[in-house]
Amino acid sequence: MSHSADSDDLFAMPGMSRAAPKAGFPQHGLFAEVAYEIVHDELMLDGVSRMNLATFCSTWVDEQARKVMIESLDKNVVDKDEYPQTAELERRCVRMIADLWHCPDPAATQGTSTTGSSEAAMLGGLAAKFRWRQRGGTGTPNFVCGPVQVCWEKFARYFDVEIRQIPLRGDRLTMHPDDVAAYCDERTIMVVATFGQTFTGLFEDVAGISSTLDQLQETSGLDIPIHVDAASGGFLAPFTAPELVWDFRLPRVKSINASGHKTGLAPLGVGWAIWREAADLPAELIFDVDYLGGSVGTFNLNFSRPGGQAITQYYEFIRLGHIGYTRVQSAIYRAAGRLATGLREFGIFEMLHDGDPHRGITAVAWRLTGDPGFNLYDLSDRLRSRGWLIAAYPLPADREDETIMRAVIRHGFTVDMAELLLADFERCVKQLAQHPFSTPLTRQEAGGFTHTATAAVPNKKIDPA
Ligand SMILES: *Cc1c(COP(=O)(O)O)cnc(C)c1O
């Protein structure tokens, strides 16, 4: 370094005497350690990710996973010829997941890693659209679903497919099999069942929906496939509720997506899309790239993508195995169960999902009973002052009248942390009872930090404030 020893304290270095560049492209650079410290320190303002119970995504991995990620920093997953072993590890993951989800022939089917469940959902939806066209479908295609994650609204808008969302009724908080047939017609390319709903964490009844569609086929001749959005449930139920039939054991299920970076325990940036049989992925969607003197098919929305996430997913699979995943996921359900039990004891919360592994994902969702003098946005705001990020939001249509709160419990959240959180709940509830906010916070003021129901109105500018 060229600067002198008497000024070599990091915080006395040139560049530290002014604010970080923010708008125009900076003319001059900084010493690497100065630039690093500035970036590092600015990130102190972010929330603590492991206290962010609004996210579904991994916020803890072990040392070896970190090492594998660093060692894979330069691997581009699309360069199959240059990094054939990265491609091989990705393909092994596809076979392992196909096996986990009961594909008829896991070694022969099609599947791919993606950036997350959103890309995997787009691919599943596109394949359904192409298959429907191959069968002679014409006009504007549609798909039928319950309350879905925003990626399905994106799929509908980006790819010109009508979304037919079945509204909620009363205490039916998931898409009910009885309601499905009325929304289907000859232009329905698929029914999307959510296995682990974003809003409540509850599983939709995929087997029930499948048998409704069997009956519909008998009476009308319509043969409508199912895509399962198992973003979170796909890496839970196989381990902790294996008797639940939601996957390729149902012949009508043609494709499934899941987020490796959620309950798959891989770091951020990986999802999976798997088809029942190779023939369920139309050939028009496949592009060939070079691979060890031959070629291999790819079908992703992006070209270059980091390879480390799929590599680390493989590490997690062989590190934990079926038994290890079962132990890890059971431990997370235990922490969720402890939180639900503790919340019930307050006497003011009713559980919509109490973390039962047979009913939903590793999450707890609740509503207020009666009027304790504050609402869930107030409570969310109060908890935030202790660092906990827990989302409060209205249910989707037609139950927007109901406000709920949801905590997603993940790898790295312990029973001890559940106790600490419950102690903070008690503190916050007491404080709110003694000192209610003068005006109740609205959803926007409370931050509305949920990614569940934030699809903007078409062409509406998002207010930067
Ligand atoms: C999180 C989630 C998605 C989107 O997944 P990403 O991996 O964040 O792209 C889609 N569907 C459901 C049900 C989800 O929970």
Image (spheres, helix red, strand yellow):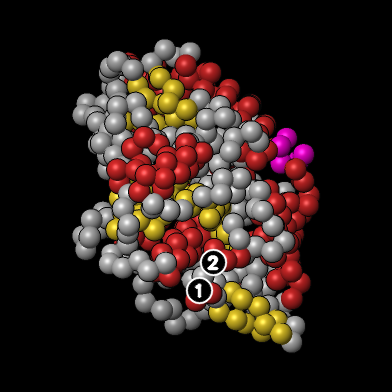
Q: Quadrant of the C terminus?
A: bottom left
Residue beneath disc 2: 281
Instruction: Calculate the distance from the C-alpha at mark 1 to the C-alpha at mark 2.
Output: 7 Å
Label 1's element? helix
Check if residue 180 falls in the magenta segment. Answer: no
Quarter occupied by residue 190: bottom left
Q: Quadrant of the N terminus?
A: bottom right
Q: Would you say the residues marked 1 and 2 are in contact, meaning their CB atoms lie under 8 Å apart?
A: yes
Crowd class of label 2 (few under 14; some 14 to 19; many from 20; radius 10 Å)? many
Three-letter code, disc 2: Leu
Q: Dot 1 corresponds to which residue?
A: 285
Q: Is residue 440 visible?
A: yes
For the residue marked with disc 1, what is the amino acid?
Answer: Leu
Q: Residues within 10 Å of mark 1 (few under 14, many from 20)?
A: some
Q: Nearer the viewer, residue 67 or 164?
A: 164
Query: Residue at image x 66%, y 53%?
Result: 104
Q: Measured from the top left, where is residue 441 in percent x and y? A: 26, 34
Residue at 55% across / 41% down in the picture? 246
Quarter-of-image position of residue 463: bottom left
Looking at the picture, tell me which residue is in the foreground, 403 or 321: 321
Please name the predominant secondary structure of the magenta segment in the image: helix
Tell me which residue sits at (71%, 41%) in the image.
325
